[in-house]
Amino acid sequence: MKIFNEILDKHTKMYNCKRESYMINDDLEILISQDGNKVAMWGVNHKTDRFLNLSTKKFKKLMDGFKSVSTDMYSNGNCYYITLGTSNNDSLVEDESYEVEIEELKSKIDCLNDVIARLERNNKRLEDDVEKYKKDYLYYFNEYLKLKDKDFKRNLDEMDQLKKNSLMHNARGAGRKAKFTDDQVDEIRRLREDGNTIKEIANRYNCSVGLIHKLINEKL
């Protein structure tokens, strides 16, 4: 892979950089920090927000290239630490020095900063999603309330219509025959004798003309 050749050409010899980035593709990125012959390297998969395992077959050419020119190479966590040049006792002592440890810590801090930045981006996306879902919930809840109000109003309208139909039905004398006490029937007969029309009496008792006429005839 061409990008591996670029990395090896630049970082397998004395070089200084705080951190340089190399994009393998749209999702995969390799980052390198180098101080002379001390190289710290790690990779990130931005799609999954995970560190890359550089020991897999996909990165064999890159790792073999570093192995061929290094006196020491080891991994600690997700970061690879490489010492370039000829192995000797002095270099081993130097590897254990505080200066090397400081550089390693700086590289780890860089890794953590990358992780924090990605987590912050993810958190922002989640906050945006929550806000969107909240708006969607409020919208659909309001639509539900509108439909509920419409159903309630429709039920009231249907009840009113049934009541009107019932009143109209009774006004025509339909339905169950009204029950009158003997005193009421006597009152109806007296009203008739006093000259009230059957219709007037029916209106007074809220019943049909036929029923009043029948009651009067039955009693007479």
Image (cartoon, helix red, strand yellow):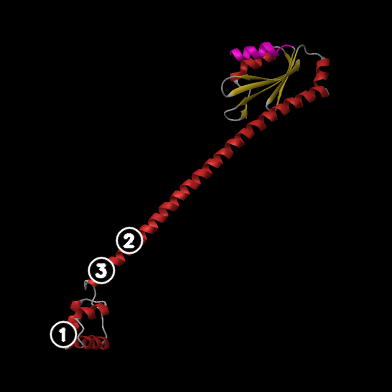
Left or right for 2, reference 219: right
Residue 124 within the magenta-colored segment of the rendering: no
In this view of the protein, which residue sits in the foreground, 203 or 158?
203
Q: Secondary structure at mark 2?
A: helix
Q: Position of residue 71 (x, y in %)?
A: 75, 15
Q: Position of residue 181 (x, y in %)?
A: 27, 86
Q: Amino acid at mark 2?
A: Glu
Q: Residues within 10 Å of mark 1 (few under 14, many from 20)?
A: few
The answer to whether residue 109 is seen in the rendering is yes
Q: Of the numbered discs in the image, which one, if any, rests on residue 93?
A: none
Can you identify the residue that label 2 sits on? 158
Using the numbered discs, state the Cα–Cα distance from disc 3 to disc 2 in whole angstroms. Answer: 15 Å
Q: Residue at x 21, y 71 (%)?
A: 172
Give the extent of the magenta segment.
1-13
Q: 4 above or below 106?
A: above
Mark 3 residue element: helix
Left or right: residue 165 compared with residue 101 = left
Disc nearer the start of the sequence (3/1): 3
What distance separates the C-alpha of mark 3 from that of mark 1?
A: 26 Å
Q: Quadrant of residue 72?
A: top right
Q: Nearer the viewer, residue 95 or 39?
A: 39
Mark 3 or 2, closer to the camera: 3
Which residue lies at the image location 19% right of the left edge and 83% below the top edge? Answer: 215
Q: Amino acid at mark 3?
A: Met
Residue 217, disc = 1
**Residue 47 sits in quarter:** top right
Residue at 34% across, 60% down: 157
Residue 2 located within the stretch drawn in magenta = yes
Q: What distance separates the C-alpha of mark 1 from that of mark 2?
A: 40 Å
Mark 3 = which residue? Answer: 168
Q: Amino acid at mark 1?
A: Asn
